[in-house]
Image: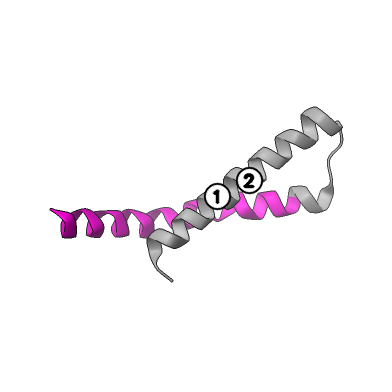
Amino acid sequence: MDPAAHAAKVALDAASAFWLTLEQATRHKKFCSYCLAAAAASLATVPQVVPEARLAWRELRRRVT
C-alpha cells in the first residue's frame, strides 16, 4: 500500500474514532466498551504510521521540485 494513502486512511480513521467518542460523551452520556476499544486501536495506529508518512512526504516533495 502506498504510504501516503495509508497515512491518510489512518488519519481519517483516528478522526472518526475521536468524533464518535466525543458524540458518545456529549450526546448519549454513555460509552460503549466495544466502541472505546475500536477507538483506542484506531488512535494507537497513528504513531506507527508517522515515520513512514514523513518519508513518503519527503519523497513526494523531492519528486515535485
Q: Is residue 60 above or below residue 21?
A: below
Is residue 40 left or right of 14 when viewed as pictured? Answer: right
Q: Is residue 41 magenta?
A: yes
Q: Residue at x 53, y 55 (%)?
A: 10
Please name the residue that numbered disc 2 is placed on.
Answer: 16
Q: How is the image coloured?
A: one colour
| Kind of residue indicated by mark 2 | Ser
Numbered badge on residue 55: none
Q: Is residue 40 above or below residue 23?
A: below
Q: Position of residue 36 (x, y in %)?
A: 75, 47
Q: Which residues are magenta?
A: 37-65
Q: Is residue 47 magenta?
A: yes
Q: Is residue 21 above or below residue 39?
A: above
Please name the residue that numbered disc 1 is placed on.
Answer: 12
Q: 63 and 18: which one is in front?
A: 63
10 Å crowding of disc 2: few (<14), some (14-19), many (20+): some
10 Å crowding of disc 1: few (<14), some (14-19), many (20+): few
Q: Quick one: quadrant of the N terminus?
A: bottom left
Is residue 38 left or right of 58 when viewed as pictured? Answer: right
Q: Residue at x 37, y 56 (%)?
A: 53
Q: Residue at x 77, y 50 (%)?
A: 35
Q: Position of residue 24 (x, y in %)?
A: 79, 36
Evaluate if marks 1 and 2 touch, with contact meaning CB atoms under 8 Å apart. Answer: yes
